[in-house]
Amino acid sequence: MSDAINELRAEVPLPQEGFEVVYQRPHSLNDTQFTYCPGCQHGQVHLCIAEAIDELEIKDRMIGMAPVGCSVFAYWFFDFDFISCPHGRAPAVATGIKRADPEAIVLSYQGDGDLASIGAAEIVHAANRGEQITVVFINNAIYGMTGGQMAPTSLEGMVTSTSPRGRDVSIAGKPIHVVEMLSTLSGVAYAERTTAHDPKGLIKTKKAIKKAFEYQMEGLGFTIVEVLCGCAINTRRTPKDSAAWVGEEMNKVFQVGVFKDIKEEG
Amino acid sequence: MLHEMIFAGFGGQGILTMGQIVSYGAVDNNLETSWIPSYGPESRGGTSNCTVMISDERIASPMTAAPSAIIVMNEPSFTKFVPKLKPGGVCVANRDLVTSDTDRDDVEIIWVEANLEAKALGNLMTAGNIALGALNERVGFVADKAIEDGLGHVFSGKKAKLIPLNMQAYQLGKDLARKG
Amino acid sequence: MSQMTAEAMKDDLAWLPKGRQLMKGNHAVCAGAIRAGCTAYFGYPITPQNEAIEYMSGALLDVPNGIFLQGESEVASINMVMGAAAAGRRVMTSSSSPGISLKQEGISYIAMMELPMLVMNVVRCGPGLGNIAPHQGDYFQAVKGGGHGDYRLITLAPASVHEMAEHAHLGFELACKWRNPAMILTDGVIGQMMEPVDLDAIPVVDWKKPDWAMGVNRTGRKPNLVTSIWLDPEDMAQKHLEIIDKYERLKAAEVRFEEYMCDDAEVLCVAYGSVSRAVMGTVRKLREEGMKIGLLRPITLWPYPYATLRELAKKVKSVVTYEMSWGQMIEDVALATRLNPVPLHFVPRHGGLTFNPNDVETPLRAIYANPQNSDTLWEIS
Ligand SMILES: Cc1ncc(C[n+]2csc(CCOP(=O)(O)OP(=O)(O)O)c2C)c(N)n1
């Protein structure tokens, strides 16, 4: 897939003696270049996850669930065990894996179509049972992989390929607020929404994911981080405009913040 | 009469639209036609192609392993499709983006500097129609009117103002092929 | 109906798909369905049939009383279809293999409820997530009953974009006539391809709610019940016998197929859907060379043209089945020819690779020269 790029990289001279490596690719990622479109934040969130894993030194315990969506090939980039799940069923697959191997740290990485539409039942019940897993939920308000259809999180009035005259909430309902909904369930230990459209948001995203993994390691319950992202291609925006749209329009509808933290609740 | 054609290039060069112009035009002029985009594993790697059939009788296979005419707008398409061309087939190749050559002497290659000519016309997106003009001049798969009809389908509403420029590009392609 | 001026009438029908148009297969099926009186669609996006759900999301907003809803899943969508069918609508859904698997539970219920509805499967390559390329691996699932229980699905296999529109109408007609679900089984070649469609040739149906349907009871009729549960085995056996009888009558009345140059053929090819197109081209070409080859194209995959195939097979030296699968329809070919054994050959394509004309021609020449050609010879094992 990116053989040519990897070949090029091999030719780039390594740091000479006397230089110190101060920044490098996280160990939890392999050398494959991301294949995501311009203006997509799947790659940045992958980095956040990888850095959190590196800092916690849990790479060898990690098992990832790849969803069906643009991140279906997440395992091209991460350097640990992965399973490619049926559309929406990752939390159920994760349940099976975690129960079979309780020492594992289980990551379920899902998009909004995958998690909030077809997989709505699986996510609710995994959360309610307090499964010891961490869900990273990419909310880009649209179906990326299939070419821009309406998602349960699409904004009111948003034009998509299956809402050609704009999302009519009298027919399709309002955008679903996943972390708010899940935080009402007693099995949930940690639920936060962050944004990936700017550097500040990414720093918070990494912190949130790290915390979620820590809670999982402590066996506190189900953890989820919802990350607001853009899909520049399918919303027909430039990457810059797409990021601005996430920061302004999506942020208005989906407030960022911590919705549940059982440690805070004492 | 059966014309089995493949148009190929990079995504974004308007390759699929080029094929649709021909098929729309064929329908308006009561010919049988099929248009099928590269689809499935074939479409990987940023190249895009479509197969267009034109006939006066029912079209059997909408796909072919040995086209009678091709337009190749970039290097990977040239190396992929020229070897598949039927003996006696015609290829219009975009000299601006194809650097290699072929040693086949049983096919006709028409070289067109499609990008440069299109830029001179003021719109790079007309490169495909220049190539289309060149191919139709040699092969004559539809009447010129069919191309104009086809353009009317793909450039409708606000975009209709692009039709004259694209027709001009098409005519230019014909002239270039005639001059050889 | 109130009086209308000619102008208003015309405007009133602006929603009706019409004319001779170049269309994608996935669009043509929807246009044909709307002409056939379909006013409701429920579905969930999946490649390579997204053009269908996208078309309906716009078109049904303009159809009088039109309903379009993107369900939260294929499971939800097929149950929405169940509801609208029970309420007497001509209703359809569409999906591709993984999504069709999810609809199987609903299809089984709908068959036992004897509700009419149309489902399109634009088959992609499986099992599992597979890929989005054309394939025919869902043949068994469609014609042998993909869900639980003994039901059968009326299954149509269009081979052109025009037939996509035609089969939408035919599918609804058969589904409503026999009160049984119907499926259009196709693939991305037909779904993604553009060809001319003569929409005016597709009958316009003004569908009326049937007597058996659910709805506000304005006439004081006895309550209507739609169910699939018969707890008492005696009662269930009675119901089964009724449906078996219906299926027997359906099989006798509704088999459809196309014979192409079969009359004096020495080798008979069998292929359906997009594959039949590649085979037809080769048959035409080899006929020009004087080779006696014919093609049988089943149009209904259930009911299957067993009798026709049996008769044709009696006259030939060998039968070749072309399929984009590991070998599914070939078992029906074997069933049809079991009483008068003739060498059976199987030429598959795997992984989502399609048949190019030479993939058809090379083995066909070998089989024509030698009816026992060992490379392609197939036996039940
Ligand atoms: C059962 C099933 N239904 C539908 C699909 C088609 N499909 C693939 S990805 C996808 C939605 C992806 O959207 P999202 O989860 O928001 O992720 P994104 O691509 O935006 O990252 C769908 C519907 C499928 N693969 N399987």
Image (spheres, coloured by chain):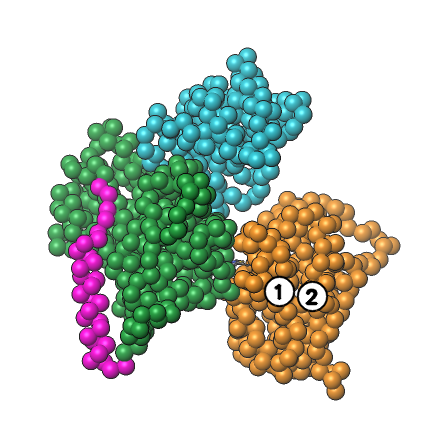
Chain colours: A orange, B cyan, C green
> Within 10 Å of the Cα at label 2, are there few (<14), some (14-19), or many (20+) other Cα atoms?
many
B113 is within the stretch colored magenta: no
In the orientation shown, which residue stands out farthest toward the front?
Answer: C3
Q: Which residues are magenta?
A: C231-259
Q: Amino acid at mark 2?
A: Phe
From the image, which quarter does the C terminus of chain C lie in?
Answer: bottom left
Establish if A85 lies above or below B177: below
Coordinates of residue A118 in the picture (x, y in percent): 52, 66
The reply to whether residue A204 is in sight is yes
Coordinates of residue A258 in the picture (x, y in percent): 73, 74
Residue named by callout 1: A175
Establish if B91 lies above or below C349: above
Mark 2: is the Cβ under 8 angstroms from ligand 1? no
> Within 10 Å of the Cα at label 1, are there few (<14), some (14-19), or many (20+) other Cα atoms?
some
Residue plotted at (46% across, 32% down):
B24
Element under disc 1: loop
Q: Amino acid at mark 1?
A: Pro
Residue named by callout 2: A254
Evaluate whether label 1 is on the same chain as label 2: yes
Residue plotted at (82% across, 51% down):
A16
Disc nearer the start of the sequence (1/2): 1
Disc 1 and disc 2 in contact, CB within 8 angstroms: yes
